[in-house]
Image (cartoon, grey):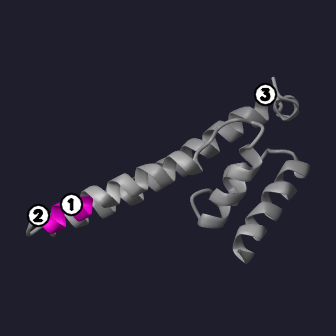
Amino acid sequence: MAPNEKEWSKSEKEIARKAYRAAYNRECKAISDNVRKMAAEIENSTDLWRLHTYLTEKRKETDERYDYRYSVLRSVFGRLLHEGWIKQEDLSGISEDKLQEIFAIAEFYARV
């Protein structure tokens, strides 16, 4: 177990797992909604392959974005918070020091 992994209490791990799933589900729903819209507008092969490219890109992006290792989870949450996939209330119950780090990371993403 990596040193950072020991820092998460059992209750924090449960909160983190729920927040992580909520963010992932929100993003998947947004992708799904967009896919439905794109599919309804397919008129030719170019439109079809545009949908394929979109799905491929989204798969790569989500695979990169969602990493549930406790050693990187604060960074993941900071990015998800900045991007709007996770809500501050989803993190309620996580220790103040972790929340401050998550908020600082979200602010960093806002600046870059």
Please tell me which residue is depicted at 38% across the width and 58% down the height of the picture. Answer: 31
Crowding at mark 1 (Cα within 10 Å: few <14, some 14-19, many 20+)? few
Q: Is residue 73 above or below residue 32?
A: above
Q: Quadrant of the C terminus?
A: bottom right
Residue 87 seen: no
Nearest-to-viewer mark from 2 and 3: 2
Mark carried by residue 45:
2
State the image coordinates of residue 45 (x, y, percent, origin top left).
11, 64
Question: Pointer 2 and pointer 1: residues touching (CB < 8 Å)?
Answer: yes
Q: Quadrant of the N terminus?
A: top right
Mark carried by residue 10:
3
Looking at the image, which is closer to me, 58 or 97? 58
- Magenta highlight range: 45-51
Q: Regarding mark 1 in the picture, which secondary structure is present there?
A: helix
Identify the residue under disc 1. 49
State the image coordinates of residue 44 (x, y, percent, origin top left).
8, 68
State the image coordinates of residue 55 (x, y, percent, origin top left).
33, 54
Residue 5 quadrant: top right
Amino acid type assigned to the residue bearing label 2 in the image: Ser
Looking at the image, which is closer to me, 99 or 69? 69
First of labels 1, 3 by sequence position: 3
Q: Regarding mark 2 in the picture, which secondary structure is present there?
A: helix
Residue 27 seen: yes
Looking at the image, which is closer to me, 53 or 31? 53
